[in-house]
Amino acid sequence: MTETGPPAEDLTARARIRDAALEMFAEHGMKGATFRGIAEAAGVSVGLVQHHFGSKQELREACDAYALDTIHRLSAEKIDGIGDPGFLARAMRIDLPVRRYLARALVDGSPAAARVFDDLVDTTETYFTAPLPPGVNAPATTDVHGYAAALVAITIGMEVLHEHLSRVLGADTFTPEGALRLRRALFDVFDDRLLSPELAARARAAMREYESGGFGRTARAGDGAPTEEGP
Amino acid sequence: MTETGPPAEDLTARARIRDAALEMFAEHGMKGATFRGIAEAAGVSVGLVQHHFGSKQELREACDAYALDTIHRLSAEKIDGIGDPGFLARAMRIDLPVRRYLARALVDGSPAAARVFDDLVDTTETYFTAPLPPGVNAPATTDVHGYAAALVAITIGMEVLHEHLSRVLGADTFTPEGALRLRRALFDVFDDRLLSPELAARARAAMREYESGGFGRTARAGDGAPTEEGP
DNA sequence: GTCTATATAATGATAGAC
DNA sequence: GTCTATCATTATATAGAC
């Protein structure tokens, strides 16, 4: 809940510019977004944008800092919120612009977005390392770090692929209906065993064999030989 | 570093330009990649790039078409390959540039990439609708389409977040070692039940309640929400 | 604080020489 | 086929007026 969101319309020009930049960066990427587009979206002149933020890089860093600060409140809830209906309602409408921005920044190469990702992995790993709440099983893995990374990647991947998921599902996943449908689908994926125990065991064995015998010989004797030849 | 190399080889200049463009588009995005950068990477002049492909949009469409054609051979194997060690080896070294390109194009907004995504969802959905191979359980979901979408999003998300996963895991996930570690982690995630049956049932109930009473005011009252009795 | 005007650089695209 | 100019447009950035 936390009404900390952008409450009203009478924000300072600087804040409106920052919000516009956040949206333009998210929509067109760090390279595609322009001062002109941002100024127009914010309803100010190009000069004012640069007066407040200096260079494009600085503007981007301001967005990063804002996003970092905003997302910080959210990250801790993501894990504990499972099974709490209130969490769904909150997660669906809090700070959408920031999430969109970070999803794009993650691909466009932002230090702040990378840090959010790393912090999420740390938090998740810590969560599974510490004593778990009743009802939550400890993951049966020997690589908790990798397990946490995969879990975070799955979660963040949904944000990054938001556009395509929304198209396929027929509802914007940043909207209550779409988010609900996606969450149900994800829950089904996680709740169900895709493989029978027998096949799962076979796959495990195959991976183990692949690991020991495959290419492991010498850490990196040759460079990346694995190139592919185009057709 | 320096990978990328269609090192001179006997490729035609046009093919070398296309490969360079594929890589530059993947690395810098559709807006960030420039004719000059592509020309330099291909070892040709800027004029030759435009002589062969005309406009930037046409060059991009050529990359899309090439990627679409290349990925077509791969998509069918992705599902059936589970548990097959040979699949791992193949998937790890086949068509890396195309996968990187598509991962980026998916975020930058390419029709071809969107189509790849949609086709993967279709293929996956068909896979689960048709009779399943022995050892593979049918997913316990009432929304096979959403289930397939979630599964594809998880898979593709790993490609899109490749850079961050690699950093966190300490190994390039497009490299045998990194890909293996990621795959093992994903397998652990899918193979294990994160929630106890009791908590899972509670989460289901919470979602159901949220769905009916929440906000939607149910634009579509009977959209197949119903009645999956939990395990 | 906010805007207009201008300088500078880079980019997509064209034309023509070899 | 391949390259070297060159143009027109657009972007970032600066300077200064109100």
Image: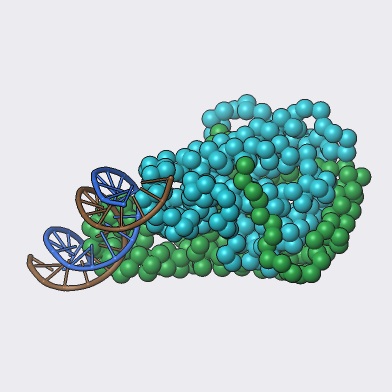
Chain colours: A green, B cyan, C blue, D brown
Q: Residue at x 59, y 66 (%)?
A: B1
Residue drawn at 57 percent across, 64 percent down: B2
Indicate the position of residue A99 as horizontal and vertical percent values: 51, 55
Residue in the image at 28% along x and 65% along y: A50
Residue B135 left/right relative to A5: right
Query: For this rendering, which residue is in front, C1 or B2?
Result: B2
Query: Which of the 4 image quarters holds residue A143?
Result: bottom right
Q: Measured from the top left, where is residue A29 in percent x and y?
A: 43, 54
Q: Describe residue B54's horizontal placement relative to residue A79 as left or right.
A: left
In the picture, which quadrant includes the C terminus of chain B? top right
Q: Return the x and y of residue B78 as percentages of the image width and height.
A: 72, 42
Residue B194 placement, left or right of B168: right
Residue B175 in the image, given as x and y percentages of width and height: 69, 60
The answer to whether one can see residue A147 in this image is: no
Q: Place residue A189 in its image quadrant.
A: top right
Nearer to us in this view, A18 or B80: B80
Image quadrant assignment for residue B225: top right
